[in-house]
Image: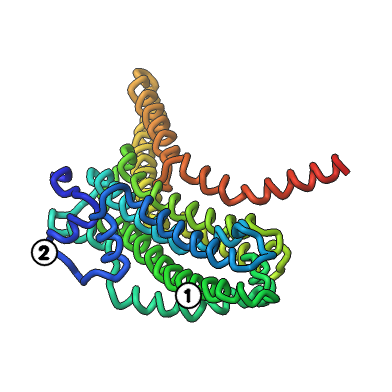
């Protein structure tokens, strides 16, 4: 049945009658992009190219300016479209993850459709509020760097009146970045909260068959890695960012948040698996106690012949205890946390290599 419930992005959500709410402006936008010919990433890349082209045209008006935008400006213009592409991609991953999770899912077809809708669609009012919050918080985020340094990062020389139009482009981009970031933050919270609810309320736990329960680990890892990539791109694009103490402190906090983003959706599933494993272990201990009681009864009665049955029972129960004890209680592939940890410590490794090469080369 699960195969019949998987449709193209956006289609399944729009054909079902089990919609708990409407569609946010982000979902409407992604749906329209899906209907365009070609892959979605080309649309986002094309929009990024438009901003770069406008920058190049405006920059050409300054006779002493660089003809091309600096690396930080490229990252700056790319941020809103990268976040939209990431959000769009995560919805596709969530849809496939729910399909893979189906063997462990305990619900009817109606609930399945509703869960699929909630995983890939956001309610309109919270998204609007989150977008407005991002619009208001964006200036605070940029205030971590002085205005003249912000202009230096995107290669604007304020002494050239002809380049003042670039300042307007930078401000417009900042507004778009704030709006999309607010929507993306809510999307992350909404989607991973739904994953957590699926684990807590709609999961049939089989301690010895957990492959299906690993389905959402790739989604959670992709979310955390995608957020980290955007943050590191900002810092690597210009050394001026890394020299700002407040910005570095914010990056550290944000990196911790990304790590928690990966772990948090699975806490409920971890508790469920651990409780199931502990129940199995307790049941094995009860049986060991019963076999031990029989063994003691025979020994007390002086009947020590034909003890093979009891010995085999004890050995089998001990082996079963070790097998159950080794069962994992975190529902993710081993590769998923490794990928997140590697991404998390990648900039630290780069910094250590830079320090080492600096010392070696004098």
Percent x, y of residue 94: 31, 52
For the point 34% across and 45% down, the residue is 215
Q: Which residue is more in the foreground, 314 or 61?
A: 61
Image quadrant containing the C terminus = top right
Question: Against 286, is 132 above or below?
Answer: below
- Relative horizontal placement of residue 155, taking residue 93 as reference (left or right): right
- Circle 2 packing at 10 Å, graded few (<14), some (14-19), many (20+), is few
Identify the disc placed on residue 207.
none
| Residue located 36% across and 49% down the image | 216
Q: Residue 17 carries which label?
A: 2
Q: Nearer the viewer, residue 258 or 268?
A: 258
Quadrant of image for the N terminus: top left
Label 1 Cα neighbours within 10 Å, binned few <14 / some 14-19 / many ≥20? some
Residue 236: percent from the left, percent from the top? Answer: 64, 55
Position of 216 with respect to 52 (left or right) is left
- Measured as percent of width and height from the top left, residue 99 is found at 24, 46
Residue at 29% x, 67% y: name it.
Answer: 122
Query: Which quadrant of the figure has residue 61?
Result: bottom right
- Front one among 222 and 47: 47
Q: In this view, does 226 lie to the left or right of 3?
A: right
Q: In which quarter of the image is residue 131?
A: bottom left
- Find residue 242 and report its horizontal and vertical position in percent: 69, 62
Relative to 100, is 243 above or below? below
Residue drawn 44% across and 60% down? Answer: 50
Name the disc covering residue 175, or none.
Answer: 1
Q: Is residue 301 visible?
A: no
């Amino acid at each position: 049945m699960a195969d019949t419930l998987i449709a193209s992005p956006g289609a399944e959500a729009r054909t079902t009658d089990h919609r708990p709410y409407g569609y946010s402006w982000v979902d409407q936008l992604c749906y329209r992009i899906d209907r365009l010919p070609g892959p979605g990433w080309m649309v986002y890349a094309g929009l990024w190219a438009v901003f770069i082209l406008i920058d190049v045209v405006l920059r050409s008006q300054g006779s002493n300016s660089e003809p091309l935008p600096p690396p930080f400006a490229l990252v700056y213009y790319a941020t809103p479209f990268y976040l939209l592409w990431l959000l769009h991609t995560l919805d596709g991953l969530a849809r496939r993850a729910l399909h893979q999770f189906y063997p462990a899912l305990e619900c009817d077809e109606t609930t399945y459709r509703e869960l699929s809708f909630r995983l890939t669609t956001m309610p309109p009012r919270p998204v609007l509020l989150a977008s407005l919050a991002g619009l208001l918080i964006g200036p605070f985020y940029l205030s971590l760097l002085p205005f003249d340094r912000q202009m230096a990062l995107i290669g604007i020389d304020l002494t050239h009146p002809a380049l003042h139009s670039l300042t307007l482009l930078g401000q417009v981009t900042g507004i778009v970045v704030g709006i999309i970031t607010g929507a993306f933050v809510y999307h992350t919270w909404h989607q991973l909260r739904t994953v957590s609810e699926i684990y807590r309320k709609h999961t049939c736990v089989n301690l010895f068959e957990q492959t299906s329960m690993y389905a959402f680990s790739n989604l959670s890892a992709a979310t955390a890695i995608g957020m980290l990539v955007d943050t590191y791109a900002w810092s690597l694009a210009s050394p001026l960012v890394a020299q700002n103490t407040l910005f570095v402190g914010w990056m550290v906090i944000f990196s911790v948040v990304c790590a928690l983003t990966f772990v948090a959706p699975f806490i409920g599933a971890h508790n469920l698996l651990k409780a199931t494993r502990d129940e199995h272990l307790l049941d094995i201990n009860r049986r060991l106690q019963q076999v031990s009681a029989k063994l003691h009864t025979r020994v007390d009665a002086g009947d020590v012949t034909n003890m093979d049955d009891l010995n085999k029972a004890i050995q089998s129960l001990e082996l079963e205890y070790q097998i159950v004890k080794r069962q994992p209680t975190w529902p993710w592939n081993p590769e998923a946390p490794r990928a997140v940890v590697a991404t998390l410590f990648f900039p630290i490794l780069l910094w250590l290599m830079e320090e080492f090469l600096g010392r070696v080369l004098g």
